[in-house]
Amino acid sequence: MNGKHKITNSAVLVTGGAGFIGSNLCELLLKQDNKVICLDNFSTGFRENINDFLSHSNFSLIEGDIRDYQTCQRAIDQVDFVLHQAALGSVPRSINDPMTTTEVNISGFVNMLHAACEAEVKRFVYASSSSVYGDSNDLPKLENKIGNPLSPYAVSKLTNEIFAKNFSELYGIETIGLRYFNVYGQRQNPNGPYAALIPNFILKLYNHQQPVINGDGTYSRDFTFIENVLQANQLAALTPRNQIAGEKQFLAEVFNIACGGSTTVNEILKSLYKECIKYDSNIESIKPIYGKVRKGDVPHSQADVMKAEKLLGFNPEYDIDTGVEKTCQWYWGRLTNK
């Protein structure tokens, strides 16, 4: 990645910094000589994700909730950039508990956005989601063509985008939303009822348990390795305003962040078997279980990343094969050293 598009010598607030994507951002930013402020309430993040950073002179942890406005103000004091990752993820979780998802993902988001306006940060980059495309059958997904959201989580992420644009128009804050498509990689939680597919499957195979596939395995996703997301966040923070917004009076854009590919659940499981068998040949005999389709699941999701490529210079460097290989290697090392 070009050096001019690496965040350096800046103060950066990473909300949800103890989570999967947030902790990877914190690690990268520290390596690049930034002052990093991590805000997390540890509802879904883990202390072990940031343990290695706690002794770093440029790392600060604020344990707090984005639903508390004073906490947001304290975290954002004298910050250059905000990388807002804090949210309650998972479509099933939002269906089971729409109230908490709304409180965190919408009220918490507006708290952070307003605090960023008051602090006059250079740019507010936030995590949106491919879930905003809802029931749209168009493939690949284009940023300007969305459908009806199919879950409270999807509604919350679409609402974030609307608020970001409104605040940019009203208050002049520069906002960029990144619509992540099925991000996976190191530090993603493999446990619990809302665990993401790839780490959950790896853990199942490691423990010689049968992976459970929701449906017949033909649903497809644009699986996106974490390193591509780290690149996108930096580009979103640093790409010059006129390169993105042109002659517009304000900067409020959203971008698909993915590889632009399509992989079925059956195909991704096959790739995981291939990699995991390198560490344990007995895995070959483990067969998956096929269950019911989950409510709110979109059958197929694939991104058109041309807008991000053109305006941000986004270039997903890690394809699905490399990403799966690196992910399995990381989890296997972590699991066997426990």
Image (tube, grey):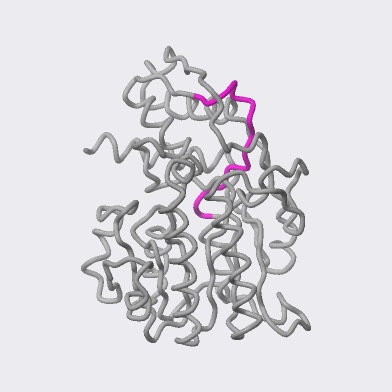
Query: Residue at the spot x=36%, y=22% of the render?
Result: 280
The image quarter in which residue 336 lies: top left
Magenta residues? 213-227
Residue 51 image offset from top left, x and y in percent: 24, 58
Residue 36 visible in rendering:
no
Measured along the vertical axis of the image, is residue 277 above or below residue 164? above
Is residue 47 in the magenta section? no
Image mark count = 0
**Left or right, 179 with reference to 87:** right
Judging depth in this view, the residue of 54 and 288 nearest the camera is: 288
The image quarter in which residue 23 lies: bottom left
Residue 111 image offset from top left, x and y in percent: 44, 73
Judging depth in this view, the residue of 80 and 297 nearest the camera is: 297
Query: Residue at the spot x=31%, y=24% of the render?
Result: 207
Residue 301 image offset from top left, x and y in percent: 66, 41
Residue 275 visible in rendering:
yes
**Left or right, 77 with reference to 116:** left
Measured along the vertical axis of the image, is residue 34 above or below residue 49? below
Judging depth in this view, the residue of 104 and 198 nearest the camera is: 104
Question: Which residue is situated farthest in the front direction here?
Answer: 99
Quadrant where the image shows the C terminus: top left
Is residue 221 in the magenta section? yes
Query: Residue at the spot x=57%, y=51% of the render?
Result: 154
